[in-house]
Image: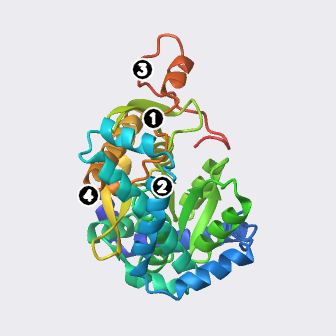
């Protein structure tokens, strides 16, 4: 209620917009040395995208289904792992859902190729923002301190990020969407993938040492997105609890960053609808006042994980089951301090490596 009263004061809101705008200008100067997305991809990839872009967008699902059949049913890339994970989670018709996941992944690849060969504005007609999600983003951005958005590999996550970046710039007072990202081992594909997103308004931050970058982005009043459905690559700053039928490691980073910056934490997830459009929905929202103390950070992480699990169960074919999401749990357990109970997270110290 107090936050609503503050934002309803025109003078205070105006001061915050000016302050956030100035911080954004300063941060923009730093971004001119952009580390990601500045190099174009190879010519053959651009030629392939140009060819795919000449086709109707509705064809992407059919082409993707064929590619998914090749990957999942002929080559059987991690097929056994995917089906075992679905079965362990208790998802009905595991084999059918696995086939659907490979088809969804294939469609996503063709959709990104189509998008790469079209102008950025072509994306708008294939994307919708759920009203509740849009209102939460607007309200968080209006506070002028930024927003931390947790997300996952659901639907076509890269296409949704591009569409969300354009929507945020238009609807949230010029705020920008920053995405914490990893580098791909195939350098040519990495350059093309990063450039595709940058050209559509996404600001990229390398996952290595991203904490300081994220804090600066939040100070500028921008919106920062972090994935929560991958295994954390560090042993500290994590919690262990069940996810989709088995113990898994969960990164406390997004909740910890939001707590330290005193900004909202939102879980925003996308999925492909029956008509082929991509829809972003608000799966969970945690206010800054709910993020006080280590116990609150862990509770927020559990809330995010539970909401993600519910979303995946509702759309099982649209989550990336290929990930080895449940690895390293035993190794992390042996790394805990003597006497430390299972599931207890150790918060990392502030540094360039940790949030």
According to the image, label 4 marks what residue?
Answer: 1
Say which mark, if any, is on residue 290: none
> Which callout, 3 or 4, points at the residue further toward the start of the chain?
4
According to the image, label 2 marks what residue?
Answer: 74
**Which of labels 2 and 4 is toward the front?**
2
- Residue 274 in the figure: left or right of residue 347: left
Q: CA distance from mark 1 to mark 2?
A: 26 Å
Q: CA distance from mark 1 to mark 4?
A: 40 Å
**In the structure shown, which secondary structural element does the residue marked by tag 1 occupy?**
loop
> Mark 3: few, some, or many residues within 10 Å (few <14, many ≥20)?
few
> Which callout, 1 or 4, points at the residue further toward the start of the chain?
4
**In the structure shown, which secondary structural element does the residue marked by tag 3 occupy?**
loop
According to the image, label 1 marks what residue?
Answer: 326
Q: Position of residue 235 (x, y in %)?
A: 57, 30
**In the structure shown, which secondary structural element does the residue marked by tag 2 occupy?**
helix
> Which callout, 2 or 3, points at the residue further toward the start of the chain?
2
Quadrant assignment for the C terminus: top right
According to the image, label 3 marks what residue?
Answer: 342
**Which of labels 1 and 4 is toward the front?**
1
How is colour applied across the structure in the image?
rainbow
Front one among 317 and 258? 317
Q: Position of residue 1 (x, y in %)?
A: 26, 58
> Which callout, 2 or 4, points at the residue further toward the start of the chain?
4
Q: CA distance from mark 2 to mark 3?
A: 41 Å
């Amino acid at each position: 209620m107090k936050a609503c009263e503050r934002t309803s004061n025109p003078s205070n809101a105006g001061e915050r917009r000016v302050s956030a705008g100035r911080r954004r200008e300063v941060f923009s100067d730093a971004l001119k040395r952009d580390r990601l997305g500045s190099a174009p991809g190879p010519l053959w990839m651009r030629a392939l995208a140009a060819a795919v872009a000449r086709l109707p967008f509705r064809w992407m699902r059919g082409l993707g289904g064929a590619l998914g059949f090749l990957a999942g049913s002929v080559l059987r890339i991690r097929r056994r792992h995917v089906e075992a994970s679905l079965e362990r989670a208790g998802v009905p018709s595991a084999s059918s859902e696995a086939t659907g996941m490979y088809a969804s992944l294939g469609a996503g690849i063709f959709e990104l190729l189509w998008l790469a060969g079209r102008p950025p504005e072509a994306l708008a007609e294939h994307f919708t923002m759920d009203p509740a999600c849009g209102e939460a983003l607007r309200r968080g951005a209006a506070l002028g301190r930024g927003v931390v958005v947790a997300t996952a590999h659901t639907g076509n996550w890269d296409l949704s990020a591009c569409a969300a970046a354009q929507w945020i710039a238009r609807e949230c007072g010029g705020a920008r969407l920053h995405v914490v990202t990893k580098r791909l081992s195939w350098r040519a594909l990495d350059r093309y993938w990063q450039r595709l997103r940058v050209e559509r308004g996404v600001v990229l931050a390398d996952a290595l040492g991203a904490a300081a970058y994220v804090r600066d982005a939040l100070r500028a009043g921008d919106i920062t997105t972090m994935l929560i459905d991958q295994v954390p690559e560090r042993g500290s700053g994590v919690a262990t609890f069940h996810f989709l039928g088995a113990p898994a490691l969960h990164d406390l980073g997004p909740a910890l960053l939001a707590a330290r910056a005193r900004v909202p934490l939102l879980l925003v997830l996308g999925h492909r609808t029956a008509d082929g459009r991509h829809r972003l929905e608000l799966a969970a929202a945690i206010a800054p006042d709910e993020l006080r103390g280590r116990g609150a950070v862990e509770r927020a992480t559990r809330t995010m994980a539970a909401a993600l699990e519910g979303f995946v169960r509702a759309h099982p074919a649209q989550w990336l089951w290929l990930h080895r999401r449940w690895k390293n749990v035993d190794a992390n357990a042996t790394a805990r301090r003597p006497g430390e109970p299972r599931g207890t997270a150790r918060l990392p110290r502030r540094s360039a490596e940790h949030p």
